[in-house]
Amino acid sequence: MHDSARPTEMRDQLVEQWSARIARSSGTTVEGILMQGENVLNALRDLRPYGPQARRMLELRARLSRPTMSKLEAIGRHAGLLRLRANRLPASMSSLYVLTQRPWRHFLKAIETDLRGMSRAEISCLFTAGPPKAAMCPLMTIVIPRTAGKAARPALIADINAALMQIGERHAIDLQGRAARVSSLP
């Protein structure tokens, strides 16, 4: 009887050691994603005067796809707050990105929750139940000149959405932007 208990104890001890080690490295992974997000965000700010071609060059040289660049940019905008809760966050770029897309009050509530082990889909569903959203009314229309080109559009939309988030934070309201495709302007 004693011999059969020994392998079980050894197994349990090994599981405990490895799970603690993995948990410690998870924080390092989150920190790496946050650092990469900040680096992308800062690079794009520095390269903004050089136009959309500089963004494309960065994507190619950094070997990052456009969607990955956009995700990291969004994560970089929230890196300061996310870093304060890194030990509670999932070690997944996609999950962190989905978290940054939550309305501000939900984002703040979510980062107070232990999200480790939660999938991207589970994070997307956080706080969706509850009272219906307040009716939204259009406030403004932003028109970009045709000379800006299609390549500048994603970066411009990302900057506008970031500005809306900051304004929403300041006034404690949810602001939403919606991109519309216009075929011709007068």
Image (cartoon, grey):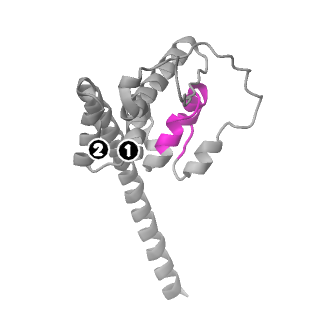
Residue bearing the label numbered 2: 59
Residue 84 in view of the camera: no
Q: Residue 61, percent across and down? A: 22, 47
Name which quarter of the figure residue 71 lies in: top left
Name which quarter of the figure residue 70 lies in: top left
Q: Distance of mark 1 from mark 2, alpha carbons?
A: 7 Å
Tell me the chief SS of the magenta region: helix
Instruction: Please rate how many residues cluster around mark 2, counting C-alpha atoms within 10 Å: few if below 14, some from 14 to 19, many from 20.
Output: some
Residue bearing the label numbered 1: 66
Q: Residue 132, percent across and down? A: 77, 28
Q: Residue 1, percent across and down? A: 55, 88
Task: Answer with left or right where residue 91 lies relative to residue 52.
Answer: right
For badge 2, the amino acid type reads: Glu
* Residue under the point 54% across and 45% down: 115
For badge 1, the amino acid type reads: Arg
Residue 128 in view of the camera: yes
Q: Which residues are magenta?
A: 96-115
**Residue closer to the observer: 33 or 65:** 65
- The answer to whether residue 105 is magenta is yes
**Residue closer to the observer: 157 or 7:** 157
* Residue under the point 40% across and 64% down: 18
* Residues tagged 1 and 2 counted as in contact (Cβ below 8 A): yes
* Residue under the point 24% across and 41% down: 57
Q: Residue 76, percent across and down? A: 37, 33
Residue 169 image label: none
